[in-house]
């Protein structure tokens, strides 16, 4: 199901938001290198990124995460952008052993313009973004006025509804 056909477009493509996370290895180096990898991908331009935030994990016992968000201008389709994010995770040693388990790199497509998409492989906006301070805190830093298309609420206003304790800027 696709709705909201008017996408936030730029001169080059569609503005999209990506959440980044890591809690294995040198997380900051991994996250910085992942952004460079994305920037070098044809059809993707990294426009800006948030600060890095130390956050508590969700799920099994594991180390704390380093999280952030980036805005990218992309000429890729949502599906191709997702494929690129998954390929980038694999380049950095991502192994999926358990749900919400520790990882070297996690890249999630959070927003793609103002597209609403619900397919078996991809849901946009990310279905749990409105519940996650570790996504909304860094996203609000770089895109506070972006309107989440399902709720019609600005990112900064979504953040006001969450407990942000345990999300600490590095």
Image (cartoon, grey):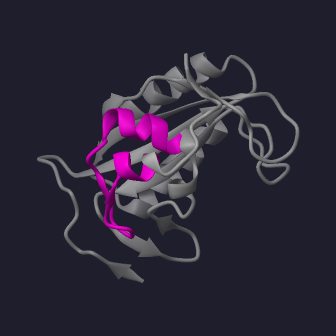
Residue at (80, 54) in percent of width and height: 99
Question: Considering depth in this image, is 100 or 14 the residue closer to the camera?
Answer: 100
Quadrant in which the N terminus appears: bottom left
Question: In the rendering, at what x and y percent does residue 37 appear?
Answer: 46, 30
Residue 157 part of the magenta segment: yes
Per the rendered image, the range of residues in magenta is: 135-159
**Residue in view at x 50 percent, y 60 percent:** 126
- Tell me which residue sits at (52%, 55%) in the image: 129
Considering the image in quadrants, where does the C terminus appear? Answer: top right
Residue 40 visible (yes or no): no
Q: Is residue 61 left or right of residue 47?
A: right
Whether the magenta-drawn stretch holds residue 152 is answered as yes
The outermost residue toward the left is 11
Q: Position of residue 78 (x, y in %)?
A: 40, 61
Residue 114, image quadrant? bottom left
Q: Which of 75 and 141 is in front in this view?
A: 141
């Amino acid at each position: 199901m696709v709705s909201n056909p008017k996408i936030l477009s730029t001169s080059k493509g569609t503005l999209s938001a990506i959440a980044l996370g890591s809690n294995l290895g040198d997380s900051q180096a991994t996250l910085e290198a992942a952004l460079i990898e994305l920037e070098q991908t044809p059809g993707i331009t990294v426009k800006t990124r948030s600060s890095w935030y130390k956050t508590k994990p969700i799920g099994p016992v594991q180390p704390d995460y380093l999280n952030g968000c980036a805005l990218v201008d992309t000429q890729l389709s949502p599906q191709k952008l997702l494929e690129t994010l998954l390929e980038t995770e694999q380049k950095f040693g991502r192994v999926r052993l358990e749900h919400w388990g520790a990882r070297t790199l996690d890249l999630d497509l959070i927003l793609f313009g103002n597209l609403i998409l619900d397919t078996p492989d991809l849901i946009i906006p990310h279905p749990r973004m409105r519940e996650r301070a570790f996504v909304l805190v860094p996203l609000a830093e770089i895109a506070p006025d972006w309107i989440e298309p399902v709720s019609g609420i600005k990112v900064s206003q979504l953040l006001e509804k969450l407990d942000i304790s345990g999300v600490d800027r590095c």
